Amino acid sequence: MYKFYSLILAATITFLTLPVFAEELSYTFISADYSIISTKLDGFTDDFEGNGIVIDLSLAVRPHMAVIGSYMKGSADLNFSGSRADADIDSTSLGILLHVPINKYSDFILSVSFFNGKAVINIDGTSFRSEDANGGVTTLGFRSRTSDLLEFYGFIRRIKIEESSHIGINVGLAYYLAESVTMDLAFSVDDDTDSIALGLTKYF
């Protein structure tokens, strides 16, 4: 069923996050966040609701280049026509990030990553089917340290899945709990999908 396939793609993409980067620190970090999403789908009265845990890693390999990766494990559900669909979702991604200074406190950022997502779908507690999704994400944006305690970022994402593609927007804030630790709050909008993520990042 194509509509269930669309649900899985929405969750897989939204849970893939890109943390903010601390000014004048290494682009080597590990972060973890908790995400909540809500998606409106044609043909369904109720929204598709989900949540997940995301682990993001980055390793600086050159002065202006880093290898980035992420792992997401989440779940989602939808009520329709008196039934309930539940999905257990796993997704991994791997890519390259380039960062170029705009000024002392801001960077221009470009990243390209590829992902694989898989979901096991149950309807009313009975196994229904398994779905796989492969695709790529191109991200273009910036980040800027606005004060000693705050950093802001914004990105536009082009998401390519199978034969389709669409555009999403991410914005976020990072608050410095310590010199190399931030608490991160991010918002994402992608077509009919809204999400919010809260997490921690440790820079090395």
Image (spheres, grey):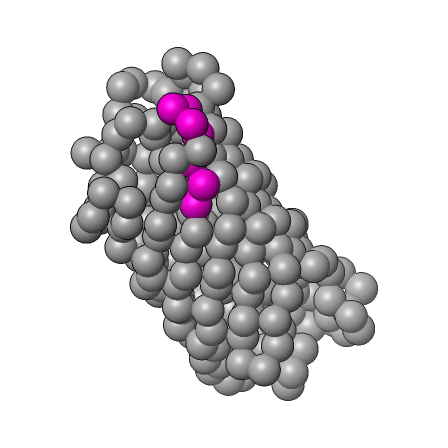
Magenta stretch: includes residue 108: yes
Query: Nearest the camera: 155 or 13?
Result: 155
Residue 129 appears left or right of 78: left
Is any part of residue 73 visible from this angle? no
Query: Nearest the camera: 177 or 99?
Result: 99
Q: Give the x, y percent position of residue 170.
A: 57, 45
When the figure is inspected, residue 179 is found, relative to residue 63, above or below; the finding is above
Determine which quarter of the picture holds residue 115. Answer: bottom left
Task: Identify the image quadrant of the N terminus.
Answer: bottom right
The majority secondary structure of the magenta stretch comes to strand
Q: How many dots with numbers?
A: 0
Residue 183 appears left or right of 121: left
When the figure is inspected, residue 136 is found, relative to residue 200, above or below; the finding is below
The residue located at (61%, 77%) in the rendering is 164
Q: Give the x, y percent position of residue 160.
A: 54, 71
Determine which quarter of the picture holds residue 10. Answer: bottom right
Q: Give the x, y percent position of residue 15.
A: 48, 55
Give the magenta-colored segment's residue range. Answer: 103-109
Residue 127 appears left or right of 72: right
Query: Nearest the camera: 131 or 107?
Result: 107
The residue located at (39%, 35%) in the rendering is 101
The residue located at (49%, 39%) in the rendering is 142
Magenta stretch: includes residue 13: no
